[in-house]
Image (cartoon, rainbow, N blue to C red):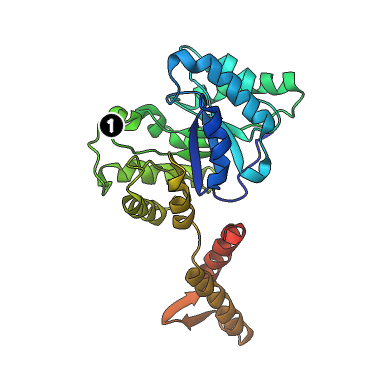
Amino acid sequence: MTPAAALARPIRSMLFVPGNRASWIDKAAAAKADALVLDLEDSVPVAAKVEARVIVADAVARHDPANGLLYVRTNPGTYMPDWDDVQAVVQPGLNGLFVAKVQGPEDVEVLARLVAEAEHRRGMAIGSIGFVVALETARAAELAFAIASHPRVQTLVSSAARNADVARALGFTWSAEGLETLYFRSKTIIACRAAGKPFPIGGLWQDVHDLEGMRRFSAFNRQLGYTGEIVLHPSNVTVANEAYSLSEQDRDYFAGMIAAFAEAEAQGKAAVIYRGEHVDIAHVETARETLRIHGGHA
């Protein structure tokens, strides 16, 4: 199988939109999220699932790539992923599926085969559709590296929200500080990076009107190593985009480091004191990589 296209840069904000709300889908693009997720799963009432599938399939067909990446969260089904969902939404214009409720890599592989069949029927290259996989079960959290290693998986999501699927699966009691999920969140980051998927996605801040609380939450996730997070409301997109972008102060700091080290190298030195800190090639490689990754984000 041809691997799905890797993420070229971080997804700072991944905005969820209920798939049965056609007018919300049209308005969501104005929020300027890096990616939209049109949801067919938990945010859609059971009675509206069929209607939502039609709405989302139409939205995929009309999607303008200038409005960001586009993903669809399909339903997991009882014994296998929902084939009707997959067949409807896998089409040109879709960047990938947001994969819910997997237990392990075998579930990812089953979905991959269904998607390959849908790609074949659409005349698409096999491997066109990538997966963003949410770790929502205890077994998936334990097998994070194996899941991340699948060629279709672009990144993992750890969503440590209050009273949601992960809280129930892992049995933690939520706090704003998040220490109860620190191991889970850090393990997700390690699994992603070990599998060569360097842009893990975090979340989830549910108090969508508490923007200051979200800023603190996002800042901590970035400190851990996350490069973006899922959001539930358009007002949260700007907060996420700012939290996971490089500030002008940091840009100047890294650019200055690179320049100072180049000057030291020209003098035959392998290290330099830069703004009071010892800096050698390891630090400069980090500076170069940071500027490269964030080059596309203002």
Quadrant location of the N terminus?
top right
Up the image or down, 15 lies above or below 248; here it is: above
Label 1 sits on a secondary structure element that is loop
Q: Residues within 10 Å of mark 1 (few under 14, many from 20)?
A: few
Q: Residue at 53%, 71% (x, y): give it.
A: 254
Looking at the image, residue 9 sits to the left or right of residue 41; the answer is right
**Numbered-mark total:** 1
- At label 1, which amino acid type do we have? Asn
Q: Residue at 49%, 20% (x, y): give it.
A: 75
Observer able to see residue 2: yes
Quadrant location of the C terminus?
bottom right
Instruction: Give 118 or 241, whichever is nearer the viewer.
Output: 241
Observer able to see residue 127: no
Instruction: Give 240 or 211, whichever is nearer the viewer.
Output: 211
Up the image or down, 251 lies above or below 172; here it is: below
Q: Residue at 60%, 45% (x, y): give it.
A: 7
Where is residue 265? Give x, y as percent.
60, 81
Task: Specify the farthest residue to the front.
Answer: 23
Instruction: Give 15 or 101, whichever is nearer the viewer.
Output: 15
Where is residue 235? Give x, y as percent.
44, 47
Where is residue 104? Give x, y as percent.
45, 26
Looking at the image, residue 106 sits to the left or right of residue 54; the answer is left
Label 1 belongs to which residue? 163
Task: Specify the farthest residue to the right.
Answer: 123
Where is residue 183? Give x, y as percent.
32, 44
Looking at the image, residue 160 sits to the left or right of residue 29; the answer is left
